[in-house]
Each structure stands twice: as structure tokens, then as C-alpha cells.
Image (cartoon, rainbow, N blue to C red):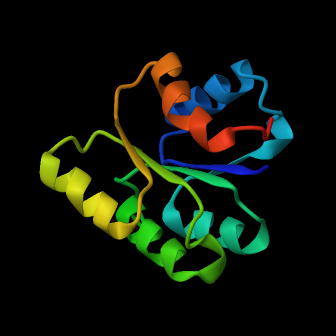
Amino acid sequence: MKILIVDDSEVMRRIHKNTLLEQKIPEASLLEASDGVEAMKIAIAEEINLFLVDWNMPNLDGLSFVKKIREMGNYAQTPIIMITSEAAKYNVIEAIQAGVTNYVVKPIRGNILWEKISPYLEGSK
């Protein structure tokens, strides 16, 4: 099980990572990227089982990343949770049309984040 946390904010990556570590997800399962370009490189090199993706990032934003990752055959069905401050209904619709599996609006508490993530990790801890 590999989870890729994609966010340009180191603080947000740490929050997401700590939430997962508190739920006994092994640290070795958690990978990080600071933008979509870095995330694409990791996705090509590793087999990712869950993506946690921010929308607003430099170089390759989250929405563009989702579209690119969905074009890769091996990630056509991989869960992608967008965790972003983009809260408008049209943003949610656009993200779902691009291929996100679930959508979470920041700021988010750890227990709520875990509720959104855990269904995609059943039996994989």
C-alpha cells in the first residue's frame, strides 16, 4: 500500500501524514510530492494505491495532475481524494468530471480526513 500526498504546503503534507500515522498506516507507505510534476515522477516510479491531492500548486496544478494520472491505464481506477480550499460547487463538479473519487474542503480536522480516506484503505493497513 502506497499513499502519495501531493501538496505544495509542507505543513499540509505533514498534517495529512500525521493523520495517517495516527491510524497506524506505516510511514514507509507514505510518499510526498510538492507539486504535480514531482507527483507524476513518483507515480511512474512507484505503484500508488491512493492519491491525496491539493488543487492549487505550482508547475502542475492538482486538477491537471488528476487528468494526466487518469490517462495512465494503471491509474484509471485508483482512488484520488482532492483536498483543497476550492469550495465552490462548480469546482467540485469540475474535479469529479476530471476523475477525483472524493473531494474534501480545507481546513479539515484529522478525524474528518480519516473518515474520507479510510474507505479506500479497507484491509490494507
Task: Please give the name of the residue rendered at 61% of the width and 31% of the height, measured from the top-left corner.
Answer: 14
Q: Residue 31 at x, y = what percent?
A: 72, 49
Left or right for 115, reference 32: left
Residue 50 is situated, as x and y percent measured from the top left of the image, at 63, 52
Residue 75 in the image: above or below residue 22: below
Indicate the position of residue 96 as horizontal and vertical percent values: 32, 59
- So how many labels did they put on this image? 0
The residue under the point 77% across, 31% down is: 25
Front residue of 32 and 95 = 95
- The residue located at (70%, 65%) in the rendering is 42
The residue shown at (65%, 32%) is 17
Tell me: residue 24, above or below residue 63: above
Viewer-proximal residue among 68 and 103: 103
Image position of 16 (left or right of 105)? right
**Which corner quadrant of the image does residue 94 belong to?**
bottom left
Quadrant for the C terminus, please.
Answer: top right
Camera-side residue of 67 and 60: 67
Horizontal side, residue 85 vs residue 108: left or right? left
User: Residue 28: x percent and y percent?
Assistant: 85, 42
Location of residue 93 (image quadrant): bottom left
